[in-house]
C-alpha cells in the first residue's frame, strides 16, 4: 500500500480538461498507474497557477469540481476525509483526499478557508515559495513569519483538525507554525544537508517535526534530491536514510510531487514505477519498516 502526500494532477486537469485520469501519458499519476503499484491513498493538491487575484478562489472551486467529476466518479475511487475513511477502504479501492497548496486562493478570508474545509480540504500549505496574506515563502527575500491573519489560519486548521503543511514556508514561518500548529507535516520536502536547495529542511527543522509527531514526505523533485545532473532512486533512499538516522523512522513518508515537475528521477518517473522504489527499499529495510514509510506513518497522522 502507498500513501502519497502530494501531487499536482488537479492543476494539469485544469490546464487541459481533455486529459483523462484513468490513463493518460501526459500525467505522471493515473488510476491505472496507481492500481499497478497498489496505491491506497493519494493526496490531490489545489495549486493555483498564475491567474488574476480576483479569480483565484473560483479556480480553486473549479479544481474541486474536476476532482469530483474526473477522479471521484471513477470506479473504485473513494473520497477520504478522515482516518476512519482510510481504515474503511476495501481491497483495491483508492482513497482520494484534497489539500491546499498555498493560501493565495483565500486572500484574507477565513470564510473561504472554512468553505474549502466543507468541500473536503484536509491539509493546508500556507504559501508557495513567495508571500501572501498568511506568510512569506522560502524564496521571498524578506523572510517574514506568520502574519496575524496567518495565525488565525493555523488556529482554524487546529480547530478543524486539518494539517498545517510547512513545505514552501520561510524559515521564520516554519518556526511560527511549530509553535502554534497542533497537526503539522511537511508533505514534500527533503534534507538540506544532503542537497542545499532552499526548499529543503535544515536539521533543526527535521528534529522539530519529529519531536512534534509530524511527518516528512520525501519528494521526487530531482533538484531537491541531488546537485548532480540526474537523480536516481538511490538519492531518494539517501534522504530517507538520513531522516531515519536522526530518529525519524516513524516520521518519514513520501510526497512525490508528480505532475508538478518536468524532470523526474531515473526509473521513478511515473506512479507505477513506485514498484522500483519498493524493490530497492526492501534491500535495506524490513517489510514492516517499508510499510511504515510507504503508508502507515502518514495514514496514522490523518485525524478523525
Image: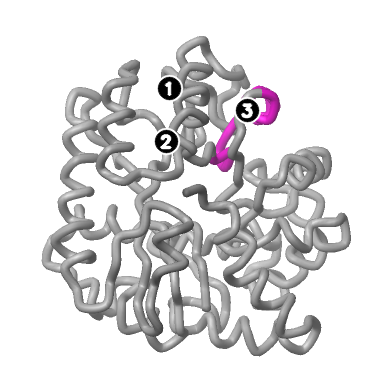
Mark nearest the camera among 3 and 1 is 3
Residue 221, which numbered label?
none
Find numbered disc 1 in the image and state the secondary structure of the residue it sits on. Answer: loop
Q: Is residue 174 magenta?
A: yes
Residue annotated with mark 1: 132
Residue shown at 60% from the left, 47% from the top:
186
Residue shown at 63% from the left, 28% from the top:
177
Residue shown at 47% from the left, 32% from the top:
127
Q: Earlier in the sequence, mark 3 or mark 2?
A: 2
Contact between labelled residues 1 and 2, with CB atoms less than 8 Å apart: yes
Q: Is residue 153 magenta?
A: no
Residue annotated with mark 3: 177
Q: Earlier in the sequence, mark 2 or mark 1?
A: 2
Question: CA gap, disc 3 to disc 2?
Answer: 14 Å
On the image, the x and y values in percent for residue 207 come to: 81, 44
Find numbered disc 2 in the image and state the secondary structure of the residue it sits on. Answer: loop
Task: State the colouring used for the structure image.
Answer: one colour
Mark nearest the camera among 3 and 2 is 3
Question: CA gap, disc 3 to disc 1?
Answer: 16 Å
Would residue 246 appear left or right of 41 to someone viewing this image?
A: right
Residue annotated with mark 2: 102
> Which segment did they paint magenta?
165-179
Amino acid at each position: 500500500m502507498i500513501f502519497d502526500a502530494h501531487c499536482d494532477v488537479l492543476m494539469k486537469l485544469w490546464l487541459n480538461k481533455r486529459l483523462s485520469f484513468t490513463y493518460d501519458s501526459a500525467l505522471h499519476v493515473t488510476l491505472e498507474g496507481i492500481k499497478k503499484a497498489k496505491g491506497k491513498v493519494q493526496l490531490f493538491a489545489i495549486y493555483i497557477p498564475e491567474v488574476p487575484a480576483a479569480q483565484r478562489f473560483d479556480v480553486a472551486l473549479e479544481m474541486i469540481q474536476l476532482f469530483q467529476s474526473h477522479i471521484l466518479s471513477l470506479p473504485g475511487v473513494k473520497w477520504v476525509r478522515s482516518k476512519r475513511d482510510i481504515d474503511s477502504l476495501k481491497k483495491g479501492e483508492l482513497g482520494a483526499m484534497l489539500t491546499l497548496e498555498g493560501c493565495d486562493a483565500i486572500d484574507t478570508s477565513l470564510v473561504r478557508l472554512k468553505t474549502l474545509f466543507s468541500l473536503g480540504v484536509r491539509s493546508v500549505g500556507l504559501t508557495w515559495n513567495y508571500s501572501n496574506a498568511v506568510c512569506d515563502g522560502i524564496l521571498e527575500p524578506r523572510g517574514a513569519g506568520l502574519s496575524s491573519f496567518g495565525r488565525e489560519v493555523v488556529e482554524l486548521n487546529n480547530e478543524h483538525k486539518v494539517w498545517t503543511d510547512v513545505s514552501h514556508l520561510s524559515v521564520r514561518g516554519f518556526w511560527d507554525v511549530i509553535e502554534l500548529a497542533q497537526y503539522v507535516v511537511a508533505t514534500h520536502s527533503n534534507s538540506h544537508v544532503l542537497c542545499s536547495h532552499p526548499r529543503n529542511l535544515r536539521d533543526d527543522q527535521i528534529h522539530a517535526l519529529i519531536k512534534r509527531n509530524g511527518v516528512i514526505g520525501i519528494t521526487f523533485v530531482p533538484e531537491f534530491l541531488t546537485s548532480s545532473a540526474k537523480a536516481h532512486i538511490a538519492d531518494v533512499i539517501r534522504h530517507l536514510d538520513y531522516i531515519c538516522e536522526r530518529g525519524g523512522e516513524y516520521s518519514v513518508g513520501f510526497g512525490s510531487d508528480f505532475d508538478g515537475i518536468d524532470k523526474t528521477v531515473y526509473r521513478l518517473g511515473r506512479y507505477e514505477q513506485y514498484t522500483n522504489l519498493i524493490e530497492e527499499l526492501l534491500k535495506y529495510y524490513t517489510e514492516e519498516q517499508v510499510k511504515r514509510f510507504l503508508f502507515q506513518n502518514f495514514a496514522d497522522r490523518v485525524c478523525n
